[in-house]
Image (spheres, grey):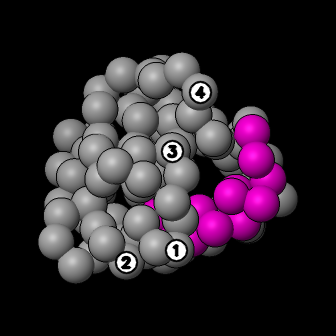
Amino acid sequence: MASKEEIYAAMTQALEGESGETLKKKFNASVVFVVDGEEWTLDAKNLTLQKTKVKGADLTVIATLQVMQNLLSKKLTPQQAFLKRKIRVKGNMGLAMKLTFVIAATR
């Protein structure tokens, strides 16, 4: 299973090059991931990832490491995780429906 550091590295890599530009076109927002209390802000608008919470994020996703691992290994979709209450989402629910793009880019 992937550690938090490996997931962070995969997100960083997803923002680089062509995959980053594709993510920017499809998602074009900022999302704060809170994974087991650790906060990361992925800004698809500016193609950056920071290990901190940034004010004014469009979406906040709260999950455990296990749930993030399941999302990345395709055992769970973001929609399934939300419906099963495995993740909590705050902010723009329209963007929450597009979370699949972020997860797919990170795989």
N-term-proximal mark, 4 vs 2: 2
N-term-proximal mark, 4 vs 1: 1
Q: Which residue is mark 3?
A: 30
Q: Position of residue 83 (x, y in %)?
A: 83, 59
Q: Position of residue 91 (x, y in %)?
A: 75, 39
**How many C-alpha atoms fall within 10 Å of the one at disc 2: few (<14), some, or many (≥20)?**
some
Q: Is residue 45 left or right of residue 56?
A: left
**How many C-alpha atoms fall within 10 Å of the one at disc 3: few (<14), some, or many (≥20)?**
many
Q: Which amino acid lies under the numbered mark 4 shown in the image of this protein?
A: Gly
Distance, label 3 to label 4, CA atoms, is 8 Å
Say what secondary structure mark 3 lies in: strand
Q: Quadrant of the N terminus?
A: bottom left
What's the magenta region? 91-102
- Label disc, if present, on residue 56 of the rendered structure: 4
Q: Main secondary structure of the magenta part?
A: helix
Compared to 55, does 104 lie above or below? below
Residue drawn at point x = 69 percent, y = 48 percent: 86
Distance, label 4 to label 2, CA atoms, is 23 Å
Q: Which residue is mark 1?
A: 26
N-term-proximal mark, 3 vs 4: 3
Compared to 63, does 82 lie above or below? below
Distance, label 3 to label 1, CA atoms, is 12 Å
Residue drawn at point x = 29 percent, y = 32 percent: 50
Residue drawn at point x = 51 percent, y = 44 percent: 30
Q: Which amino acid lies under the numbered mark 2 shown in the image of this protein?
A: Thr
Label pair 3/4, CB-CB below 8 angstroms: yes
Q: Position of residue 4 (x, y in %)?
A: 29, 40
Residue in the foreground of this view, choosing between 49 and 2: 49
Residue drawn at point x = 54 percent, y = 52 percent: 29
